[in-house]
Amino acid sequence: MNIIKCVLLFILITSFKLHSEVLVVFGATGDLTKRKLIPALINLYKHHQLDEDFTFIGIGRREISQSQFCDDISNFVSHGDKVIWNEFKEKVIYLQGSFDQDEIYKKLKDRLENKKNFFYLATPQSSFSPIVKKLHSHQLLTDARIIIEKPFGKDLDSARQLQKELYQHLEWKQIYLIDHYLGKEMVNNVLSLRFDNPILNSVWDYQHIDNVEITISEDIGIESRGSFWEETGLLRDMFQSHMMQVLSLIAMDKPISYSESDIRNEKVKILKAIRSFPLDNINNYIVRGQYDSYRKEKDVAANSNVETFVAAKIFIDNERWFNVPFILKAGKKLSKRFAEVVINFKLANQLILRIQPQEEIALVLNVPVPGYVHEVKKEELVFSLREKYQDSIREAYERLLGQALKDDHTSFVCCDEHLLTWGLFTPILNHWAQNPPSNFPNYMSGSEGPDLAILKN
Ligand code: BG6
């Protein structure tokens, strides 16, 4: 080989290395890796969405070997994906270590040279800032991206503080703040559905819409997350994040384009226009609940006042939504698992966007019944994305990881957004802390939750 060829080969090899992807997951022995991240990566790999020399590095405190780490994951891989997992696991590395010790960062550095790195912090949020500091002190943050799970902070002050600490070492565009609801197929489609159908857009306002209901109902309880839940509660876990993200997509004005910054600008405008809750009349606007067996869950205090259900009536003070109530509901241990948005039009029609368990769009119309007597019946016309596009529907984490690895922020939460939603709910959290509920637990497992008549006033 002549010298020119050697130089070209060298350039090719080094530049190739520079662009290869490494996803490092801190807290990799937790459930998130097995249940969500690995299945998402397997799908991305299957669809050729990962670099050929993509590497997954899992970091955990547990003293297990790499093959034990992989065996543990194997139990969660679906039957149909076993063959591809066997191929994919060649890309998996497990490093044992403690996040607050330098040792693990040194081990990482040995592996990461010349790579563009993504660090996924699947740890309790108290570790976010210490991990970032360590990564910085080991010079691992240049050109890196950090992916963080919600909740980001536990109120407005702590979110600001965390943000300040991260900003000391990172720019906002290096941070990917995950709200997995934004990765769900139907949530992802809301803007296109609204704005690519002028007929919908023309009736999307207070003159035509009576109220909007957004519901995330779960039949499971808090499962084994007692300690987490006692510190978090439903308002922080689901309302400040998932519910407000869905609300902002349903309510926002048309963005100039579907670029991440144009979408974010419109979302921020809507979040700013939400009316603050009147603290002197709070019970008419927000209801909290706790399921009957919550206080008997593992790691839960016997007199806990932490909520497992929240319903709220929200108003948006702008021209489009003048006096239209948005009724938001989310809770654990309810009668069934579903998430949906219902647009209740004035005079009878409904548009329902079903997020799960099936992705469906339903239109409720008054349809005349054939016969001698004039009779009109409500009928639902349903279009099921799940049935028609079964194989193309992407799971939330697949979409989100795929976007982050491509450096696309479109489906992630931006700093202004989560500070605005913390700003809305922090007074409620404080008010609740000062005014403990007198009626907890106040709903039965398997029911529809506590009585919400008061919200209708
Ligand atoms: C998570 C919450 O963000 O979302 C959980 O922490 C909740 O408490 C979960 O169960 C619900 O997500 P999904 O996708 O099952 O509706």
Image (cartoon, rainbow, N blue to C red):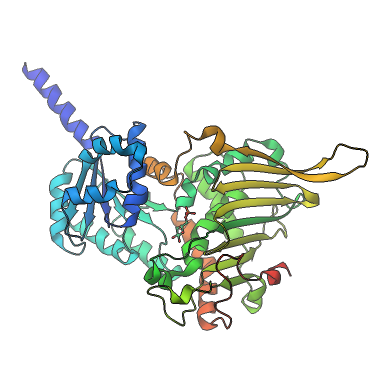
Q: Quadrant of residue 374?
A: top right
Query: Which residue sits furthest left?
Result: 2
Q: Quadrant of residue 300?
A: bottom left
- In the picture, the quarter occupied by the C terminus is bottom right
- In the picture, the quarter occupied by the N terminus is top left
Q: Residue at x 18, y 45 (%)?
A: 112
Residue 274 rendering spot, x and y as whole percentages:
61, 61
Q: Residue at x 23, y 34 (%)?
A: 53
Q: Quadrant of residue 328?
A: bottom right
Q: Residue at x 37, y 32 (%)?
A: 47
Say whether residue 439 is left or right of residue 1. right
Label tally: 0
Residue 334 rendering spot, x and y as whole percentages:
56, 63
Query: Which residue sits furthest right?
Result: 372
Is residue 140 something one can see in this rendering? no
| Above or below: residue 1 compared with residue 20 | above
| Above or below: residue 3 compared with residue 129 | above
| Above or below: residue 376 compared with residue 171 | above
Q: Residue at x 56, y 59 (%)?
A: 217
Residue 423 rendering spot, x and y as whole percentages:
51, 67
| Above or below: residue 432 compared with residue 4 | below
